[in-house]
Structure formats: C-alpha cells, structure tokens
Amino acid sequence: MNIEGSVALVVGGGGGFGGATARRLAKAGAKIAVLDLDETKGAASAAEIGNGAIYVKTDVTDEDSILEAIARAEELGPLRIAVVAHGGGGGDGRVVHRDGLAHSYEAFRRVVDVFLNATFNVTRLAAAAIAKTEPLESGERGVIINTASIAAFDGSIGQAAYAAAKAGIVGMTLPIARDLGPLGIRVMTIAPGVFLTGAYGAAAPEDLQAHWGPAVPFPGRMGEPDEYAMLAQQICENPYLNGEVVRLDGGIRFTKKGV
C-alpha cells in the first residue's frame, strides 16, 4: 500500500513506539493523527511532526473518545492506517505475594482492560472507518498494526496480567485478519522485546543497556523505537503481510526472572 496521501491514526503517538512510527510514516507522506491520553506528550509529538499533523486527546478504553478521534482523523483524508501502540503499566506482581496476599483482581482487570480490551476497541472502530474508504487498485483499503510483547510468549515472574493481555492480542490477530480480509483490510501484530522506551521509567539508558543488552544475542543491545517504526512502515507497504505476529527482539528469550 502506498503510504503517501493516506491518513495514519497512531494510538500512543506521544510515546516511544507511537511517536517514532508517527514520525516515520509522516516522512513517507502520510497525514498523521496522534492519539494519546497524555496531552503534553501528544501535542509535542504532533508539533514536532508538523505538516498538518493533529493531536487528539484519547482514552482508548472509551468508545466515544475513540470515535471522536477517528472523526478528526478522517477530516485529514482517507483513513487507511491504524497503529495501536499505547502504554499503560501497572498490575505487576506474583499471583501470591511474599507476604501471602493474593494478587489484586482489580489490578489484573485493569491491565487487561488497558492493553487487550482497549486494543480491540480501537481495532474494531478503526476497521469500521477504514472499511468505508474506496478500495485501492489492488483491492486493499488499509492496515491495522497492533502491539503485543514477547511477554505474550515468555512471560516472567510477576507478569501474569501483562502476559495475559499481550497474549490476547496475539491470539486475536489471525481471527481478525480473517474477519476483515473480505473488506480489504490487513491486520498485523508486532511483539517487541526490550526497547529503550518510557516503559522502564526514569532508569538511565546506560544502566538499562548494561542490564538487558547482554541478553540480546544480536545486536547485543536494547532496541530503538525507530526500529519498531521501520517494521511498521514495511507492514504498511508490503501487501502480503497479514494475519501474523512478528517478534522484534534481537533473538532474546525471557527466563522466569526476565534475563
């Protein structure tokens, strides 16, 4: 699919993966709608991109909020690309903590809601909007790219909620691709490994690299957000990529304690 002239809706566009993807797709000629709950980061990302990029404050757990954001994106032109790369955090911990207390059920539900349910929420609404566009010469209307994690496959101690949510994204990729195939809409999922993003909080990059880098067979370092964006661009451009989950991890495999 030709990115130039298409509208790309990037959820989490103020963050590491989303921001890098928004910038890369903009350079390829897409018109960008940055969706993020964080007004400061979202607005800054849209301003950095320029060229008519807009920011829309969006709560991915709220249907009306997503519909409003999609309507704003459609004002830019034909919506053909949706990238879902929002963060969330929270919910980590053993099923039974060292003090004998059980994991919080509400915390588990919150993580699943923010990552899995919200991803489906955006996917279904974006797909309905993309389905209204005129098909391209190839019959394609657009592509949706969701974000899982290698924790979906190699979840470590304390990651039950996060791993379950991300595994759900992996599990729904092929069925949704099959659902949307007749409409000319492709669906793909990227499962990143360890990347230098805000997910690690305020830890210094050099400390993170020292901890995680040796566990990556090659290139022996953490990933850069633009490497996620490179893959997202290739997914957009390659019409035969559909219904698949791509691990983007340098060959790392988590152990029960992470590394």
Image (tube, grey):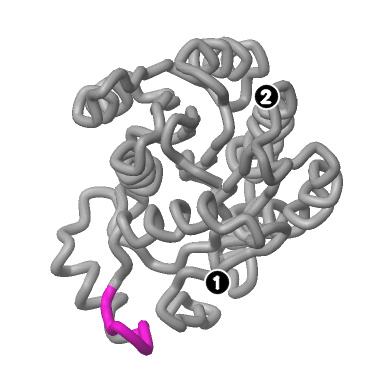
Q: Residue furthest bottom?
A: 217
| The image quarter in which residue 97 lies | bottom right
Compared to residue 18, the image places residue 193 above or below, namely: below
Judge whether residue 121 can be spotted in this image. no
Q: Residues within 10 Å of mark 2 (few under 14, many from 20)?
A: some
N-term mark: 2 or 1: 2
| Residue at which label 1 appears | 156
Q: Residues within 10 Å of mark 1 (few under 14, many from 20)?
A: some
Residue type, numbered disc 2: Thr
Look at the numbered discs 2 and 1 and tell me whether their residues touch, using CB distance below 8 Å.
Answer: no
Q: Nearer the viewer, residue 167 or 241?
A: 241
Image coords of residue 165 (percent x, y): 66, 51
| Span highlighted in magenta in the image | 215-221
Horizontally, residue 236 falls left or right of residue 57, namely: right
- Residue at x-position 28% and y-position 49%: 201
- Residue at x-position 47% and y-position 63%: 192
Q: Nearer the viewer, residue 169 or 98?
A: 169
| The image quarter in which residue 157 lies | bottom right
Image coords of residue 32 (percent x, y): 39, 28
Judge whether residue 44 can be spotted in this image. yes
Q: Nearer the viewer, residue 16 or 155?
A: 16
Tell me the quarter of the image containing the C terminus: bottom left
Nearer the viewer's eye, disc 2 or disc 1?
2
Image coords of residue 4 (percent x, y): 42, 37
Residue type, numbered disc 1: Ser
| Residue at which label 2 appears | 133
